[in-house]
Amino acid sequence: MGKREFNGVEIFDIEGGFGEGKKCILAIDVADIHDKEVREVNQNINRLIDKNRITEGVHFIDLLDENFKVTVGDLGIKIANRTKNVFLLSERGYYSLVKYMDDDKSWDIHDKLVDNYFNLKEFEENVQQNLDSKGSYNRLDDLNYKFSEKRTIKTFSNCNVMELPKRIEEFKEYLGTIKNTMVNGEITYATEIKKARYDSMLKGLERLRVTLDIGLSHHLLEKYIQPLTREKHKLENKKNGGDKTAQTKKIKKLEQRLIELDDTYIPDDTAGIYSIQCLVNEKRYVGRSMDIARRFAQHKGELESGTHWIKSLQRDWNKYGEGRFKFEVIEETDDLTLEGYYIEHYDTTNKVYGYNTYKA
């Protein structure tokens, strides 16, 4: 165990408390990083324990517990004589604490700490593995790591907006390296891999978008929707040099990608079951309508004017803003009695999980 600097604060660098190679963090360091009193952080952790939201050995360890073999003094941790708890948090425990604190600053710090502390060893090991025999960094391996099947979404969802143009250039460079491959006699075509990675990139960008304020969120949508729209128009206006059926399929795919980027787009007269979900606390409201697009417009109008009849939903809208809410169609159907099924499925009449005030 050593020490390292994060955001100008010196913290203990600890791993292994929750599994080999797994990083963990002291509550006293969380307090320093988040500019909060240690007492306040410990109180929040104890409240989570009392509510059975976190579990000892999975989310936290109390180093002052008599069953814990290593003493705080052995670790070089200085505490006051009357201190009752010295909590050590796993990444999952830290996430639960931030979710409980639930403010924008805490979430911003959480994202940085996950990237620059909890996941740093993974990144450093990847860099070390990609050093060639001369000690130079292998760029191709770096690209393969950033845009692998499991990591592409995270690469974009955790990206700093200012670094996004550079990341997209790297992504295009990576796409240029993809070729057809054969495994066990079966061919995987480069176009299939590129499509999968492109879809992952869009998902990552969408996750990034919902974390931004309204201005940046709209900027992100416009910046990437407009090029797709121009490409779509070129396909529509093209008279020669291609199969008409293939062009039609491409147009439909582009339209679908536009829809995926803008989750507020719903065709007129779409009937079914919908939800409005707060992406911060994960609560949702489930409703039904024969014209969901029109119903969403009504909900938004009431929320923006501060007159929505669901007071708890209005409070969270005022607190977090439009950019932290997702309007989504759960199921397109003419059977509106399914509303009751989804209310029960998501338990949205429970104030912990939802905004519905009664069961359908």
Image (cartoon, rainbow, N blue to C red):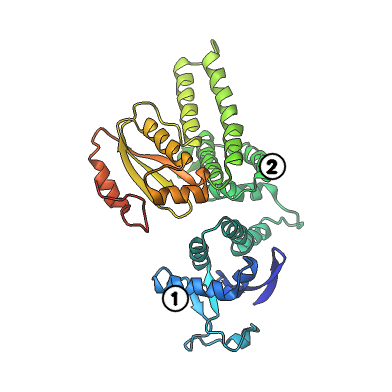
User: Residue 26: x, y in percent?
Assistant: 58, 74
Q: State how many labels appear.
A: 2
- Looking at the figure, which quarter contains the N terminus? bottom right
- Residue 309 at what x, y percent from top left? 37, 44
Residue under label 1: 56
In the displayed structure, would residue 99 be above or below residue 207? below
Q: Which mark is residue 206?
A: none
Q: Disc 1 versus disc 2: distance between alpha carbons?
A: 42 Å
Name the spot of residue 4 as percent of width and height, x first. 70, 70
- In this rendering, the answer to whether 91 lies above or below 312 is below
> Where does residue 170 sit, x and y in percent of width and height?
66, 42
Residue 345 falls left or right of residue 67: left
Q: Nearer the viewer, residue 159 or 335?
A: 335
Foreground of the two, 187 or 335: 335
Identity of the amino acid at label 2?
Lys
Q: Earlier in the sequence, mark 1 or mark 2?
A: 1
Mark 2, secondary structure of its residue: helix
Q: Few, some or many C-alpha atoms within 10 Å of disc 2 (few <14, some 14-19, many ≥20)?
A: few
Q: Residue at x 45, y 51 (%)?
A: 315
To which residue does mark 2 refer? 166
Number of residues whose C-alpha sits closer than 10 Å to that of mark 1, classed few (under 14), some (14–19) or many (20 or more): few
Look at 59% across and 64% down and name the residue there.
Answer: 118
